[in-house]
Amino acid sequence: MKYLISMLAGAGLAAAAPLQARATDSYFFTFGDSYTMTSFDVNGTQPTTGNPMGNPTLGTGTTGGGINWVGYLTTVDNASLVLTYDLAVGGASLDNSLVPTGITGDVVSQVASFETAYGQKPDTAPWTSDNAVFGFWIGINDIGWAWSSNDVSVMAPKIMAEYKTLAEKLYANGARKFIFLNVPPTSRAPEIADQGATIQAGHAAWLAAFNTALETMVDEFIADNSGTTTVLYDTFSFMTKILDDPTTYGFTDATCIDSTGATCVWWNSYHPGYAYHKLQAADMKEHMHSLGAW
């Protein structure tokens, strides 16, 4: 796996820091699609110490049968208080003007919602550059909708240019801590795999090129925006490890579907269950020490 951390000599130095020294209360703003969403309403109950994800009830509003990675990083896998504002929307692409999905709430809109609701650091979220973390997990739907009719060498640079622009909008608002997640091997999800080897291979090739473009974008974002602490988390490698050896991690096999989210990697044909999210969050924590509360 590759993890990038700016302002540090390397991930090993971050991991070696004493837990007490790196643990600070954090505000966590997340953007993305159904793999991230908790159906949070910016006009609903806001996160507090006693209810760190605000609305809705923890474990509801997700696409995994229970708590997703955001919920675990907020309520279980952390070293100090995390208050989370999850702006992700199911079905979202990065930018509907580039990859239209028919869903209102692309990441362009999500960042705009952040600026309206939280950009001025209201009493409900008095974040600072030092204690706020901004997380992006997007691309699954961009690939799903675009791969069969678009040249990735043409489309991916357009997506990444906009992706960088959105991150820089947050930077302009004072954001300095970022985590980007690449796209997991959704080519191996039943919905794609069941369409046959040719479809699966085409999807996988587009996905690989997308993830390579994302890595380049993150490098450029770090270089062009001073003073950031930025992590690129490799969900592709982590999920691949699980799918290659599912029984070791408590799953029946790599292709089964379990609507409870407990015994199979897949909760439905395209989304992992909460048991997978729990494993990923625990792994992510080990690569997030530089960001504060983890």
Image: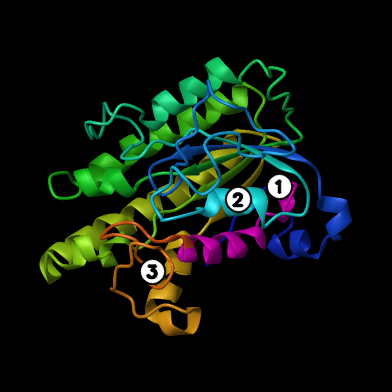
Few, some or many residues within 10 Å of mark 2 (<14, 14–19, 20+):
many
Say whether marks 3 and 2 touch (CB < 8 Å): no
Q: Which mark is residue 231?
A: 2
Residue 19 in the figure: left or right of residue 81:
right
Q: Which residues are magenta?
A: 275-294
Residue 32 in the image: state x and y as whole percent.
Answer: 43, 40
Residue 62 badge: none
Q: CA distance from mark 3 to mark 1?
A: 28 Å
What residue sits 20% from the left and 44% below the top?
145
Tell me the mark number nearer the camera, choosing from 3 and 1.
3
User: Disc 1 vs disc 2: Cβ atoms closer than 8 Å?
Assistant: yes
Q: In this picture, is 64 found above or below 180?
A: below
Structural crowding at the residue carrying mark 3, measured as other residues with C-alpha within 10 Å and reported as few (<14), some (14–19) or many (≥20): many
Looking at the image, is 4 positioned above or below residue 229? below
The residue at which mark 1 appears reads as 291
Q: Main secondary structure of the magenta part?
A: helix
The type of residue carrying mark 1 is Leu
SS label for mark 3:
loop
Type of the residue with mark 2: Val
Q: Using the rendered view, name the quadrant where residue 17 is placed.
A: bottom right
- Which mark, residue 265? 3
The mark that comes first in sequence, 3 or 1, is 3
Q: Is residue 177 above or below residue 5?
A: above
- How busy is the neighbourhood of tag 1: few (under 14 within 10 Å), some, or many (20 plus)? many
Check disc 2 and report its element: helix, strand or loop: strand
